[in-house]
Amino acid sequence: MKALVVRLSSIGDVVHTLPCLDALHRAGHSAGWLAEAPSRDLLAGHPLLTCRVEPPRSRAFRFGPARDAVAALRREHFDIALDFQGLWKSAAWARLSGARRVRGYAGRFRREPASACLIGERFDQPDDAVHVIDKNLALLRGIGIDAVGSREFSLPTTSSAAERVARGLSELRVERFALLNPAGGWKSKLWPPECYGRLARGLQERGVASVVSWGPGEQALAGEVVDASGGVARLSFPTTLSEFAELARRAALIVAADTGPLHIACAVGAPAVGLYGPTDPARNGPFSVEDEVVRRAPPCAPCHKRSCAVHANIMSQIPGDEVLAAAERRLGRGMPHAV
């Protein structure tokens, strides 16, 4: 069977869907993926994908690229399209793919419930699927694949990424280091930069250097962390997503909020301390039993609103000493088993 994975964005969502790709491959099925531009670097050249089609983003929609994407999908003759996202746009693309079957969750389990009208095979999420990875994997049960609980991620490295990261770390003159990622898509989910700065000083006192990572448009925020650390933390060199994954593989620890970089790091087996507020770590937190979570839950939790007066400042209430203690515990347990 040839399946189309429809998970358009965001980076964390794409990472949390990767175990489905491995599960399809183990069951003997081939797969393509429909994803928007931000995830291009994670999926381009992926060894388990027969194709990757990139539709135009909604905010920059143009008819020509959309027509080309539909044509590219229909040339693949997919047997089934799997809508893991639960939106109008993901359901529409699943239908437009030309797949004989379109499978997704029922309306009350979708972010945009009415979009279920475009789904031919609608299913309820099972009670045993708590983490978002398992919610994704449970969708495969209807095609004879029961992989709930699997944590296999195909995020292969390349020699060029490995060389780039090795060279960058050499220039920073760090060996054992913690990766601090202060940025992310939702401001309300982020720990303040001055808190990361104090954490870097505490880690330095314990013999662990800190490297502050950043993505497009985030360098200034990363610089605030370096300044708040008194220059103890090092500003990372720029990385692509695949290079960030390689950087995380080499880290003794990552400390980050509920963001794509944290999920990439967990996928490659980096020891993690996750910082959580409005979102639920049971649903989309680190999944290794060795990892740590520090949380302050607002009254509205779990809340998935990017802007919410109730949880606007909840992340600033996470005490630095709790995060440092969690980091010490996680560093003491060392690397987890291979993922």
Image: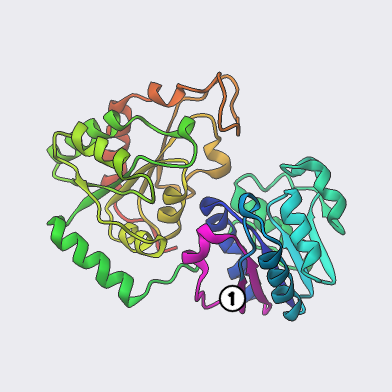
Q: Locate residue 131, reporting x and y percent.
A: 60, 46
Q: Is residue 217 visible?
A: yes
**Residue 119 image-quadrant placement:** bottom right
Vertical position of residue 75 compared to residue 38: above or below: below
Q: Which residue position holds label 1? A: 49
The reply to whether the magenta stretch includes residue 51 is yes
Vertical position of residue 248 compared to residue 51: above or below: above
The reply to whether the magenta stretch includes residue 123 is no
Q: Locate residue 248, reporting x and y percent.
A: 33, 57
Secondary structure beneath label 1: loop
**Residue 163 image-quadrant placement:** bottom left
Q: In the image, is 227 to the left or to the right of 311?
A: left
Vertical position of residue 325 compared to residue 45: above or below: above
Q: What residue type is labelled 1?
A: Leu
Front position in the image: 169 or 105: 169
Highlighted magenta segment, given as a residue range: 27-52
- What is the count of numbered marks? 1
Image quadrant in which the C terminus is located: bottom left
The residue depicted at 74 percent of the width and 61 percent of the height is: 93
